[in-house]
Structures are given as C-alpha cells and as structure tokens.
Image (spheres, rainbow, N blue to C red):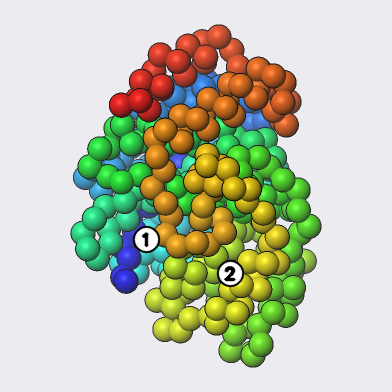
C-alpha cells in the first residue's frame, strides 16, 4: 500500500529571538536537563496550533533550543523537513534520517516529539504519535499517554494511534519498553548484518538503516525493519522485501519481552511487530496515565529521580483538564 506522510516535528535548536528563547526557557527550564512538568508540557501545546494545523495538513515549524547548536544547522533541519511523495523513504533519501542526524551528540538533546499525519490509499486519516527519546530521563513514558489523550480530543476526525517502535529506540544501550527505560546490550550493525544470509540481504539492511557511524553501533531505532508491516516500507523503496526469517532474527536479537498486561501490552503492542499500530482505547490511556504518572510516583517507585514528585498544580491539571478529556 502506498503511504504518503506529512511530517509534523518539533526540534530544539537556537532560538530566533529573545522572546522565543524566554518561551522555550519557560517550557524546559534554564538547564536542558531540567524536568518537564505536566504544567509546562501542556503550556507548550498551543505551539502546535500556532505553527501548523493537523486538520489542514500545514507543515509544523521549528521550536528552537540553543543546546542543539553543536549538532546541526537550521539549513540542515529545513532539508530534513522536506518530505517527498514517497513519504517515509524520502526522509532517509540521503542515507540517514533526521533523528539519526540529530542523534550524533545526544547529550545535547533532551527529546524530540514528532507527529505523522498519514493518508492511506483508502483515504482514512490516522495520526501516529511517537516520541523519539535521547537518554534515560523517562520523558516519553510520562507524557505520551497524555499527548494521545489531548490529540484524540482535539482532532476527532482522526484515529489517533501509537507507533510504539519509536518508544523502543536503541541509543547507547537504552530502550524504552512498557513505559520504562531499560538498559540493554548495545546492538552492533555487524551483529545484524551477520544474520543476513546473502550479500543482497546485507545491502538491503544497510540501505534501510542508512549510514551507521559511531564505531559500527546503530544509533537509531530499527524503524524500517521492525515497524508495522515489517519490511513493507523498505520494499517500497527498493522493490524487494527482506526475508521473514531475517526479520525474526533481528526481533529476537532485540530481546524485548512484553508482559501480558491489559494496559501495558495494549500500549506497547507494536514493539513486538504484531501488525499495524493498534488504536489505543482511551480507558487504557486513563489507566496507564494514572498508574504511571500518579500512583507509582506518589509511592516513590518511579525509576527516574527528576520525576520523583509531581507538583500540586500539575496534579490539578491532570485531574481537572486531562481526565475529563479521557473520559469523553
């Protein structure tokens, strides 16, 4: 099936003016590692409305943060945002995706939310929501359910789905699965290509992953291979599909175990490549958001110290503004 994607991305790099810098500082805190509260997270949502309109397909603009100055330039980012008719494949036409380019110095980047507005051949519009995460702060697991709730309430004409493969990226041994950051053994490119039985397969793997640097490690998600429809996106790019055996081998290499929990399994279904991203039931978002963001934190069970407490105003926002949206 031919898929055309319009990309809505938020990047962080140098602010254009003092007012914008102050606004970003207000959202993120003066230090790039500052914890992001529910309050200032939702304060950032109007940016999506100001810079782009999902319902009309306008391209979203750029949020700036000076910590990414060492990573890339505005011109490079502008190039990344140019998405052609072939959709996802066009993003990696130069051998590396935008997230790969931006991940060269991940210590200078906190996180990069992104939204895919997908128009499938049948004409049905799906909004795929994901958060590319750099590091182990747990930002994505905290806010993604609330993002989804907001987007579903704001854009009722779209089916909001959750592309969880982007919550399972491989960055220096960290992987997010089941709402938590887990440490796993770094997976090298050679380990993956060794699973390929022929040179042709190795070439296809190389083409899918793009330019792999950093001593042969793979600093980006296995998106093209393990995302929904397994190798279908790759086949659109090169006219062939990887063998299912190779797909299985690489999945096993990741060693991701998803427990059979009605909330977590639903939320993270696509990590194990079991078909198209599932539509998440709002009840599950409600259970997940309440359990992870409130109950576990209040019991002191959150793995990440910066989220060891939620301020009273953020709790009020969750109770008064978010839960009514979730309940419909």
Instruction: Examine the image and state in which quarter residue 156 appears.
Output: top left
* Residue 162 appears in the picture as rendered: yes
Residue 159 percent coordinates (x, y): 31, 46
* Residue 132 appears in the picture as rendered: no
Residue 197 percent coordinates (x, y): 66, 87
In the drawing, does residue 206 fall left or right of residue 41?
A: right
Q: Which mark is residue 83?
A: 1
Is 183 or 274 nearer to us in this picture?
274
Q: Which mark is residue 124?
A: none
Rounded to the nearest whole Å, what is the CA distance between mark 2 and mark 1?
Answer: 18 Å
In the drawing, does residue 327 fall left or right of residue 55?
A: right
In the drawing, does residue 208 fall left or right of residue 281?
A: right
Residue 307 percent coordinates (x, y): 66, 24
Q: Residue at x 56, y 55 (%)?
A: 271
Q: Residue at x 31, y 63 (%)?
A: 4
Q: Residue at x 42, y 59 (%)?
A: 276
In the drawing, does residue 195 fall left or right of residue 75?
A: right
Which quadrant is home to the N terminus? bottom left
Q: Residue at x 70, y 60 (%)?
A: 255
Q: Which residue is mark 2?
A: 209
- SS category of the residue bearing label 2: helix
- SS category of the residue bearing label 1: loop
Which quadrant is home to the C terminus? top left
Label 1 crowd bin: few (<14), some (14–19), many (20+), radius 10 Å? some
Is 30 or 308 nearer to us in this picture?
308
Label 2 crowd bin: few (<14), some (14–19), many (20+), radius 10 Å? many
Relative to 39, is 54 above or below? below
- N-terminal-most mark, 2 or 1: 1
């Amino acid at each position: 099936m031919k898929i055309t994607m319009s990309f809505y991305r938020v990047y962080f790099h140098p602010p254009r003016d003092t007012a914008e810098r102050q606004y970003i500082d207000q959202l993120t805190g003066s230090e790039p590692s500052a914890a992001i509260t529910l309050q200032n997270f939702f304060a950032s949502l109007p940016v999506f409305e100001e810079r782009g309109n999902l319902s009309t397909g306008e391209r979203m603009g750029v949020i700036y943060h000076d910590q990414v100055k060492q990573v890339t330039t505005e011109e490079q980012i502008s190039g990344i945002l140019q998405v052609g008719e072939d959709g996802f494949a066009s993003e990696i036409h130069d051998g590396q995706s935008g997230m790969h380019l931006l991940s060269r110095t991940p210590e200078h980047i906190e996180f990069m939310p992104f939204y895919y507005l997908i128009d499938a051949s049948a004409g049905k519009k799906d909004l795929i929501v994901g958060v590319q995460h750099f590091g182990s702060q747990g930002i994505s697991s905290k806010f993604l359910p609330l993002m989804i709730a907001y987007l579903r309430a704001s854009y009722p004409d779209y089916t909001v789905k959750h592309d969880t493969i982007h919550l399972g990226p491989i960055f220096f041994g960290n992987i997010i699965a089941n709402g938590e950051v887990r440490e796993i053994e770094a997976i090298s490119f050679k380990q993956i290509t060794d699973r390929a039985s022929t040179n042709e397969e190795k070439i296809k793997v190389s083409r899918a992953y793009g330019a792999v640097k950093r001593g042969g490690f793979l600093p980006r998600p296995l998106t093209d291979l393990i995302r929904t429809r397994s190798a279908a996106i790759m086949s659109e790019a090169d006219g062939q599909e990887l063998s299912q055996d190779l797909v299985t081998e690489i999945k096993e290499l990741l060693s991701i175990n998803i427990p059979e929990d009605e909330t977590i399994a639903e939320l993270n279904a696509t990590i194990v490549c079991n078909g198209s991203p599932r539509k998440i039931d709002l009840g599950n978002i409600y259970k997940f958001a309440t359990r992870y963001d409130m109950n576990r934190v209040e019991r002191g069970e959150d793995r990440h110290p910066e989220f060891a407490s939620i301020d009273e105003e953020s709790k009020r926002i969750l109770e008064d503004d978010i839960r009514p949206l979730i309940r419909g």
